[in-house]
Amino acid sequence: MKARLPKGYGSGGANNIQQLARQAQKLQDDMEAVSAELEAKEYEAAAGGGAVKVAVTGKMELTKVEISPEVVDPEDVEMLADLVMAAANEALRSAAKEKEERMESISGGLNIPGMF
């Protein structure tokens, strides 16, 4: 006895695979375009009420650090380092969050290893 496939399943398998491959390629192209756009974007954050400001790129590179002179205390360098670190981490979180949200909106929540 032969198993019968539902109508439309037996023929056109190659067409379905080609269509799936085209859709996957479009998804990858869209994700690469968004990734390039986000890598060029700059994210800023501040700490200590604006005493320390930093900027990072979507590539997660620190590009700018601004420190208000009034927070530079030779007796408390540790606090200044903490403010710089807090501002940098906040800017990096903003960049990562936007990338995750944009990629998820493109992929529809589909998690494909190696795609982004």
Image: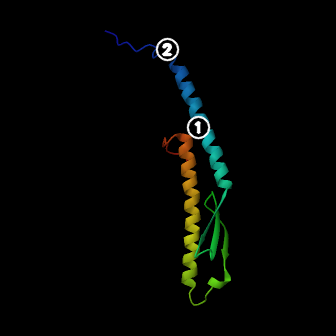
Residue at the location (57% across, 62% down)? 92
Looking at the image, tell me whether mark 1 or mark 2 is earlier in sequence order: 2
Residue 53 percent across, percent down from the top left:
64, 71
Between 47 and 80, the residue placed more toward the observer is 47
Name the front one of labels 1 and 2: 1
Residue 64 percent across, percent down from the top left:
68, 69
Q: Which residue is tagged 1?
A: 27
Name the side, left or right, on which 90 lies relative to 39: left
The single residue placed furthest to the top in the displayed view is 1
Secondary structure of the residue carrying numbered label 1: helix
Using the image, determine if residue 32 lies above or below residue 6: below
Residue 42 percent across, percent down from the top left:
67, 60
Using the image, determine if residue 49 lies above or below residue 77: above
Q: Which residue is tagged 2?
A: 11
Q: Amino acid at mark 2?
A: Ser
Q: Amino acid at mark 1?
A: Leu
Secondary structure of the residue carrying numbered label 2: loop
Residue at the location (55% across, 43% down)? 105
The single residue placed furthest to the bottom in the displayed view is 75
Is residue 54 visible in the rendered structure shown here? Answer: yes
Q: Quadrant of residue 82?
A: bottom right
The single residue placed furthest to the front in the displayed view is 49
- Residue 57 disc label: none
Q: Residues within 10 Å of mark 2 (few under 14, many from 20)?
A: few
Quadrant location, the N terminus = top left
Between 105 and 28, the residue placed more toward the observer is 105
Using the image, determine if residue 39 lies above or below residue 72: above
Q: Check contact, mark 1 vs mark 2: CB within 8 A.
A: no
Q: Quadrant of residue 25?
A: top right
Between 94 and 26, the residue placed more toward the observer is 94
